């Protein structure tokens, strides 16, 4: 019985350790603004109460500034907590953010 437990638990533990290490490495090497620390894999998801979300986001903006990053289940979310920060970011990056996506319709362009 114990041999079976070791054989099944060892690969699961190895996958968990690799996932946590990958998550920590990705967060440390990202070029995103700093933000509140969270748990590996879950990020800041357990720190948020979605009923009073704005209170937590406001508290973090007082601590980390008007632009910070939170991580939810491995996905980064950059929070802009002031109109000035949003306008500054969109104005500074307007060549990147103002481009329209290309919509290609069938039959619009001749095939060569």
Image (tube, rainbow, N blue to C red):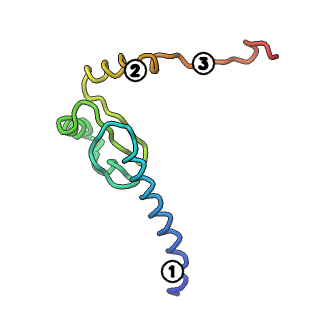
Residue at position x 47%, y 61% in the image: 18
The quadrant of the picture occupied by the C terminus is top right
Asked if 75 appears above or below 111 in the picture, the reply is below
At which x and y percent is residue 98?
46, 16
Query: Element type at marker 1?
Result: helix
Q: Are marks 2 and 3 in contact (CB under 8 Å)?
A: no
At which x and y percent is residue 28?
36, 48
Tell us which disc is closer to us: 2 or 1: 2
Give the side of residue 37 with respect to residue 25, left or right: left
At which x and y percent is residue 110?
78, 13
Measure how far apart labels 1 and 3 are at the Cα level. 54 Å
Give the side of residue 59 with respect to residue 75, left or right: left
Tell us which disc is closer to us: 1 or 3: 3
Residue placed most toward the observer, 49 or 19: 19
Q: Residues within 10 Å of mark 1 (few under 14, many from 20)?
A: few
User: Closer to the N terminus: mark 2 or mark 3?
Assistant: 2
Residue placed most toward the observer, 78 or 48: 78
Residue at position x 26%, y 29% in the image: 81
Q: Place residue 66 in its image quadrant.
A: top left
User: Closer to the N terminus: mark 1 or mark 3?
Assistant: 1
The residue that mark 2 highlights is 93
Measure how far apart labels 2 and 3 are at the Cα level. 19 Å
The residue that mark 3 highlights is 102
User: Closer to the N terminus: mark 2 or mark 1?
Assistant: 1
Residue placed most toward the observer, 51 or 3: 3
Q: Place residue 72 in its image quadrant.
A: top left
Measure how far apart labels 2 and 1 are at the Cα level. 54 Å
Asked if 69 appears above or below 99 in the picture, the reply is below
* Tag count: 3
Query: Element type at marker 2?
Result: loop
The residue that mark 1 highlights is 5
């Amino acid at each position: 019985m114990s041999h079976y437990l070791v054989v099944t638990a060892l690969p699961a533990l190895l996958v968990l350790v690799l996932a946590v290490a990958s998550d920590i490495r990705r967060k440390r090497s990202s070029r995103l603004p700093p933000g509140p620390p969270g748990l590996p894999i879950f990020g800041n998801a357990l720190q948020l109460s979605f009923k009073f979300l704005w209170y937590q986001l406001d508290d973090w903006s007082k601590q980390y500034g008007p632009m910070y990053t939170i991580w939810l289940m491995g996905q980064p979310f950059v929070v802009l907590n002031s109109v000035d920060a949003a306008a500054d970011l969109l104005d500074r990056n307007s060549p990147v953010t103002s481009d329209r996506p290309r919509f290609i319709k069938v039959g619009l362009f001749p095939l060569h």
